[in-house]
Image (tube, helix red, strand yellow):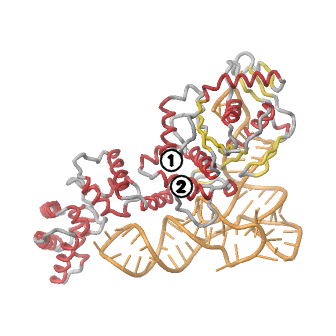
RNA sequence: GACCCCAUCGUCUAGAGGUCAGGACACCAGGUUUUCAUCCUGGUAACACGGGUUCGAUUCCCGUUGGGGUCGCCA
C-alpha cells in the first residue's frame, strides 16, 4: 500500500506557521516513505474562501518546496458525495434526523455514536481512549442541507485514499468522532498523528500579535524558504543526532513520526535568523543578489540604474554580514545613494576628535594619488601613511569609514573603498570635510 | 467545570534505570581583525514539586502544581 498524506487547509487568506508545520511533516513523512502528498482545499465556508485565499495557500506551499501529487481536491465539489454518504448512514440506522432547535431551523442529520469506548494509537501521542459517556452524537448535515466538517473531512480522506493523517493537536477530540464515522462507513481508518502546538513566549497559542505568524510574513522579511522549513521541521522533531542545519533531502531521509515530540514549543526568532544565515552561506552569490534585490524593491530602495556587477560586488563585500535579504537595504544603503545618513555617535567619536579632520585631509591627499584604486593599493597607501606619521591603522581607518559610509560598522574598509570606486570615495571625503562640524 | 494532553539550561532539543545530564541558538570572557559580522577557545545555565517501585531514578507508577487542547447546525 502506498503511503498517502494530505494537507487540508481552509483558505482563509493566510497560512499560519502551525498549519504549514503540519504540512511540512506530512510532506516529509510521505516523501520519506516514497508515498504521495496530496492537497485538499476545504473551501466549504464560502464566506471566507476566495480565489485569492486559495492562491495564498498554493504560493506558500510552492515557496517552501512542498510539491503536491496530483491536482488539489476542492472540498466544495464533493458535496453530493458527502450527502450520499449521509443518506447511507441514515438508511443503515447509524444516523437519525432531528430538529434540535437553536441555531438552525428544521431537521438536521445527526450521527449516532456507537455507545462504546473508542481507542486508538496516536503515532506521536501513544494510546488514547475516550469513554462512551464522554462521546456525544453530532451533526453531520445541517438543517439547510450542507454537510458539516466532520463528515466532509472523513469522506474526502477516504476517497483520496489517505493512509496517515498528521494534523494539529487541536484535532485529537475530533478523532474519536472521525473513528466512529470510519467504522460506520465501513472504511479502514488511517493512522493518526497529532502534532503539539507552536506557542508564543508566554506559552499561549501563537497568534498575529506575536509578530510573524504567517508564512507570507517570513517571505516578505527576506527569510529563505529552506531556513524556515528547517527551523519549523526542528520544532518538535529531531533527527536523533546533533544535526541541525540540514538540507531538505537530509530531513526526508531522517524523518520518522517516532521522533516527533509531544510537547509544545515556541519558535525562537533569533535562532531562525541564525539558521537563515547558515542557509544563506550555502546559496550562490547570484541567488543572494536576487533575494536582496527583491527585498530592496519591497523596501522601496531599488533603482533600475543600479549596475548588476556593482550590485554583486557590494554583496560579496558585505559577505556574511547579510543574514536576511532585507539586511542589505538596511545596513548597506550607502552603497547606493549619496543621501546616506551620518551616524551621530560615529561622527562624534571619529571625526569630531582633535585633529581628526586634518588627518582625513592627509588621507584624502594620499588616496588621490592611488592608482589603480584597488583594495591592496589603498591598503598599502594608508599603511605607508601610518608608518610615516607614526599613527595606528585604527586612527586612519575610522575617519575614512565614517566619511564614506556614514557609519562606524561595516565591511572591511579597503574592500569597501574598491567597490565604491575612487571617484565616489574622494567626493565623499571632500564633502565630509566641507560639512560643518559640531 | 468535565474530559484529554504536556512538563530537561532563557529558547529548540538529546536522553528510552547507573551519563561529569550531551548539542544548538542566545548570553558572558578571551583570541583573530581597522569597526561590525564571521571564525577559534573557554564559561554561566536545566531534569517543576512530593510520594512510591528499585541496590539505583531525569528516565517507570501515583499525586500536586503549572501550562495547553476540546466541549458549535466553525473548520
Q: Nearer the viewer, residue A222 or A393?
A: A222
* Chain containing the residue with disc 1: A
Residue A130, given in percent of the width and then of the height, sits at 81, 42
Q: State the image quarter where residue A46 is shown.
A: top right
Q: Is tag 1's residue or tag 2's residue first in the polypeptide sequence?
A: 1
Residue A418, given in percent of the width and then of the height, sits at 21, 65
- SS of the residue under disc 1: loop
Q: Is residue B18 above or below residue A311?
A: below
Please name the residue shown 27% across and 60% down the image: A313
Mark number, residue A248:
2
- SS of the residue under disc 2: helix
Q: Nearer the viewer, residue A436 or A139?
A: A139
Q: Residue furthest front?
A: A1
Q: Residue furthest top?
A: A106
Which quadrant: the C terminus of chain A? bottom left
Residue A386, given in percent of the width and then of the height, sits at 19, 80
Q: CA distance from mark 1 to mark 2?
A: 9 Å
Which quadrant: the N terminus of chain A? top right
Q: Is residue A176 left or right of residue A26?
A: right
Q: Is residue A236 above or below residue A184?
A: below
Q: Which residue is mark 1?
A: A65
Q: Is residue A165 above or below residue A232?
A: above
Mark 2 neighbour density, 10 Å: few (under 14) some (14–19) many (20 or more): some
Q: Are marks 1 and 2 in contact (CB under 8 Å)?
A: yes
Amino acid at each position: 500500500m502506498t503511503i498517502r498524506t494530505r494537507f487540508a487547509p481552509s483558505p482563509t487568506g493566510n497560512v499560519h506557521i502551525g498549519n504549514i508545520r503540519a504540512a511540512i511533516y506530512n510532506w516529509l513523512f510521505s516523501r520519506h516513505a516514497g508515498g504521495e502528498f496530496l492537497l485538499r482545499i476545504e473551501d466549504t465556508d464560502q464566506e471566507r474562501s476566495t480565489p485569492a485565499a486559495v492562491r495564498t495557500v498554493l504560493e506558500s506551499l510552492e515557496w517552501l518546496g512542498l510539491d503536491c501529487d496530483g491536482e488539489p481536491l476542492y472540498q466544495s465539489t464533493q458535496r453530493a458525495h458527502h450527502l450520499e454518504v449521509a443518506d447511507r448512514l441514515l438508511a443503515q440506522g447509524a444516523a437519525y434526523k432531528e430538529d434540535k432547535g437553536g441555531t438552525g431551523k428544521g431537521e438536521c442529520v445527526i450521527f449516532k455514536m456507537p455507545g462504546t469506548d473508542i481507542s486508538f494509537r496516536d503515532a506521536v501521542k501513544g494510546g488514547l481512549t475516550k469513554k462512551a459517556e464522554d462521546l456525544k452524537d453530532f451533526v453531520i448535515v445541517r438543517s439547510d442541507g450542507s454537510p458539516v466538517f466532520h463528515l466532509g473531512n472523513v469522506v474526502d480522506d477516504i476517497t483520496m485514499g489517505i493512509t496517515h493523517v498528521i494534523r494539529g493537536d487541536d484535532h485529537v477530540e475530533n478523532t474519536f468522532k472521525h473513528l466512529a464515522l470510519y467504522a460506520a462507513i465501513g472504511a479502514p481508518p488511517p493512522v493518526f498523528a497529532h502534532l503539539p502546538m507552536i506557542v508564543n513566549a508566554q506559552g499561549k497559542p501563537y497568534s498575529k500579535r506575536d509578530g510573524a505568524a504567517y508564512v507570507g510574513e517570513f517571505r516578505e522579511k527576506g527569510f529563505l524558504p529552506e531556513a524556515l522549513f528547517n527551523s519549523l521541521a526542528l520544532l518538535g522533531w529531531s533527527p536523533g543526532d546533533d544535526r541541525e542545519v540540514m538540507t531538505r533531502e537530509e530531513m526526508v531521509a531522517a524523518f520518522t513520526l517516532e521522533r516527533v515530540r509531544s510537547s509544545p514549543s515556541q519558535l525562537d526568532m533569533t535562532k531562525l535568523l541564525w539558521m537563515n544565515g547558515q542557509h544563506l552561506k550555502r546559496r550562490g552569490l547570484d541567488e543572494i543578489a536576487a533575494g536582496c534585490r527583491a527585498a530592496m524593491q519591497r523596501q522601496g530602495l531599488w533603482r533600475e540604474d543600479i549596475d548588476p556587477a556593482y550590485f554583486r560586488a557590494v554583496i560579496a563585500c558585505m559577505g556574511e554580514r547579510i543574514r536576511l535579504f532585507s539586511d542589505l537595504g538596511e545596513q548597506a544603503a550607502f552603497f547606493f545613494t549619496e543621501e546616506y545618513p551620518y551616524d551621530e555617535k560615529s561622527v562624534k567619536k571619529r571625526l569630531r576628535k582633535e585633529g581628526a579632520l586634518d588627518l582625513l585631509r592627509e588621507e584624502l591627499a594620499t588616496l588621490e594619488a592611488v592608482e589603480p584604486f584597488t583594495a591592496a593599493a589603498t591598503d598599502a597607501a594608508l599603511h605607508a601613511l601610518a608608518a610615516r606619521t607614526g599613527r595606528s591603522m585604527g586612527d586612519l581607518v575610522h575617519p575614512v569609514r565614517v566619511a564614506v559610509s556614514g557609519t562606524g560598522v561595516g565591511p572591511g574598509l579597503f574592500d569597501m573603498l574598491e567597490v565604491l570606486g575612487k571617484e565616489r570615495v574622494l567626493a565623499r571625503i571632500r564633502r565630509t570635510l566641507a560639512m560643518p562640524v559640531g
